[in-house]
Amino acid sequence: MTTIVPPSHDIHPLDVPGSDPFEIARQAAAQIAEKTGVERHDIALTLGSGWAKAADLIGETVATLPATEIIGFSKPALEGHVGTLRSIALPGGKHALVIGARTHYYEDHGVRRVVHSVRTAAATGAKTMILTNGAGGIRETWKPGQPVLISDHINLTADSPLEGATFIDLTDLYSARLRGVAQAVEPSLDEGVYVQFRGPHYETPAEVQMAKSIGGHIVGMSTTLEAIAAREAGMEVLGFSLVTNLAAGIQKTPLSHEEVIEAGRTAEPVISSLLARVVTEISQGG
């Protein structure tokens, strides 16, 4: 029987010297099962800026929990992230865990906290991890409000969720099979390479040109560390970016967080419907 250790208000359990992040993820999964009444979740989704309404469209909500009630989760620092964990019954009998509590690398809490939600999702039984974000587009043909599939990534954080001599193959990190499912649902979907910077400042025009020169098409401040952790946990990964703006130097006007939020609100009905259709297809064996 799993022993659940309550979160400490003095020290975060993932910061305790010698703590096992995978055991804490298992404890978190046990708490989620107890509080939702759902023994197993099959698909997990992290909903970034602009994607939150998809949770209302993919199925029937079984339970919604404040993430801070679950061991290992931190309060979201970013406006636009709702700070909840939501269990949803999908058509056909499967269940999705919707994560609205993302810890960003720039919050400086350490990588373990950044990837705790992904490790918890894996511990609940999820075999598919869908990661979404709002990001800057480098291709001038892209427009704000456009969803783009992530085909690969470049991690410029100089960090990793892997600890010790842990070697994980990332050749097909963003599953070609799942991207094919998404493109079958919406043939107009474009795709590109996502580049994660540390943040929280936006990239300079020179940094954007550097990202472009090394093969990047999308720039942002999340996702890559979560994707690596998902692969380590044995999950198949699908990534979506919402182009909330063109990146610095590509877009000729100054960037602002308000612009990102507004682009997400405007695009939300369309991209949420798209994501819901993709989830349905995956859950039904696509």
Image (tube, rainbow, N blue to C red):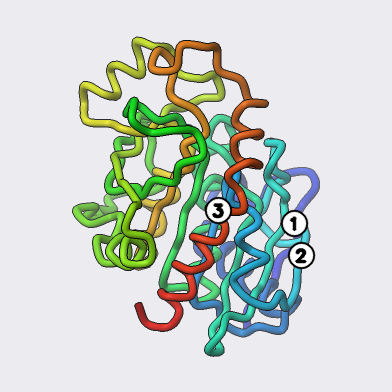
Q: Is residue 79 above or below residue 59?
A: above
Residue 198 visible (yes or no): yes
The amino acid on which the numbered mark 2 sits, given as a three-letter code, is Leu
**Of callouts 2 and 3, which one flags the residue occurring earlier in the amino acid sequence?**
2
Viewer-nearest of labels 1 and 3? 3
The amino acid on which the numbered mark 3 sits, given as a three-letter code, is Val
Q: Which residue is mark 1?
A: 7
**Of callouts 1 and 2, which one flags the residue occurring earlier in the amino acid sequence?**
1
Query: Observer-nearest residue: 142 or 130?
Result: 142
Identity of the residue drawn at 40% across and 30% down:
137
Q: Percent from the top left, x then y, of residue 238?
A: 38, 58
Q: Which residue is mark 2?
A: 65
Are the residues at dot 2 and dot 3 in contact (C-beta closer than 8 Å)? no
Q: Which residue is mark 3?
A: 270
Q: Secondary structure at mark 3?
A: helix
Query: Observer-nearest residue: 233 or 262?
Result: 262
In the drawing, does residue 75 fall left or right of residue 148?
Answer: right
Identity of the residue drawn at 41% across and 74% down:
282
